[in-house]
Image (spheres, coloured by chain):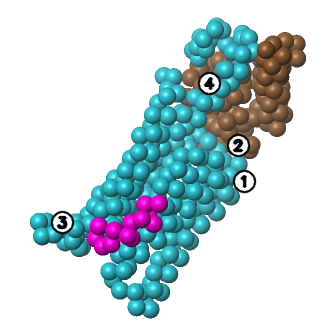
Chain colours: A cyan, B brown
Amino acid sequence: MPHKPNDETALDDALDPAAMLALVKDQQSGVSRRMARQIPWILFAWGIAWFVGFGMLWLIDGARPVFAVPLVASVVVFIAVQVAAVVASAVIGTRAQRGIRSSPAAAFTGTVYGVTASAAFFSMYIFAVGLAANGMDKQLQTIFFPTAFGIVIAIMYLMAGAIWHAVPSIVLGGGILVVSLIAPFFGYPNHYLFFAVAGGALFFGGAISLALYARGGKTD
Amino acid sequence: MDELDPVIHAQARLRIVSALATLDPGESITFPRLLELLDMTAGNLSTHLRKLEEAQYVLVTKTHQGRTPVTYLELSKVGRRAFEDYTDALRALLGAQQ
């Protein structure tokens, strides 16, 4: 007998064991998909941030002599799209979790994860400043910064996948790690183009995959 | 099917318990969000939640966010164990039938 969520007259009835077990699987899968429905927008926001942000950095020197964007304008746009993605992630993430109250253990895990991410980014920045103080030139810094932060982002995605048993997060983290490690071999400024295209594609691909998964369980 | 828990062995209550079991132990969900996830009417959800609460399978916590009353629902330890026993019993029945 097919499962009909709104057939309230039948809700007190029991089905045969196979149908009841299928009902459990359908319900749990449906809840997971509904919970994931907003997450593609977070990945989409980061796809834009990487594609537009790194694309603007590449345009400082990458398309010369045909076209060039002033350094200040590129950096301002890069920072603006990163900040916008952070804000979008916070707003959408909060909305996706609305109505759910964490257990003290889960809240502790989330807090430690958030603080670890901030500490890792700050540590990497201080490390870069230390290297610059010891003679790392500006051209090398343009190689170091995106890959260093890319590695931190990748590790945070991998950790998130391990903590919350999220395979898509592990796949995305692995992809970001590979992109971050390959990029330096393109050299300045084409490593920015690689970050824009390959990194952007990773996030857009993740967003589309997750959206298809979430839509698969749509019951309304 | 005498061995199947009669509290859970009804479509509506099984759907409620299955949905609550996707949350981690100790996590809870508001009544409106559960309603949205289950696609039931408020009256029906309330009726079945009451039966689950009477069996001590679901813990109901009433609190306030500012001035707004909020009801949080979570699967109790007893309820989580009953759900696991129920699904194990279903699998055992299906295994015995094959």
A194 or A59: nearer the viewer: A194
View extreme (right): residue: B3
Left of A76 or right of it: where is B31? right
A66 or B65: nearer the viewer: A66
Q: Which residue is mark 4?
A: A26
Q: Earlier in the sequence, mark 1 or mark 4?
A: 4
Q: Which residue is mark 3?
A: A63
Mark pair 4, 2: CA separation = 18 Å
Q: Which label sits in the foreground, 4 or 2?
A: 4
Mark 4: give few (<14), some (14-19) or many (20+) Cα within 10 Å.
some
Mark pair 4, 3: CA separation = 52 Å
Q: Which label sits in the foreground, 1 or 4?
A: 4
Task: Provide the secondary structure element on which disc 4 rests.
Answer: helix
Q: Quadrant of the C terminus of chain B?
A: top right
Q: Please determine if labels 2 and 3 lie on a single subunit.
A: no
Which residue does the image show at 63% across and 26% down from the upper left? A27
Task: Provide the secondary structure element on which disc 2 rests.
Answer: loop
* Residue A53 visible in the current orientation: no
Q: Which residue is mark 1?
A: A105
Question: For the residue marked with disc 1, what is the amino acid?
Answer: Ala
Question: For the residue marked with disc 3, what is the amino acid?
Answer: Ala
Left of B54 or right of it: where is A60? left
Q: CB under 8 Å between callouts 1 and 2? A: yes
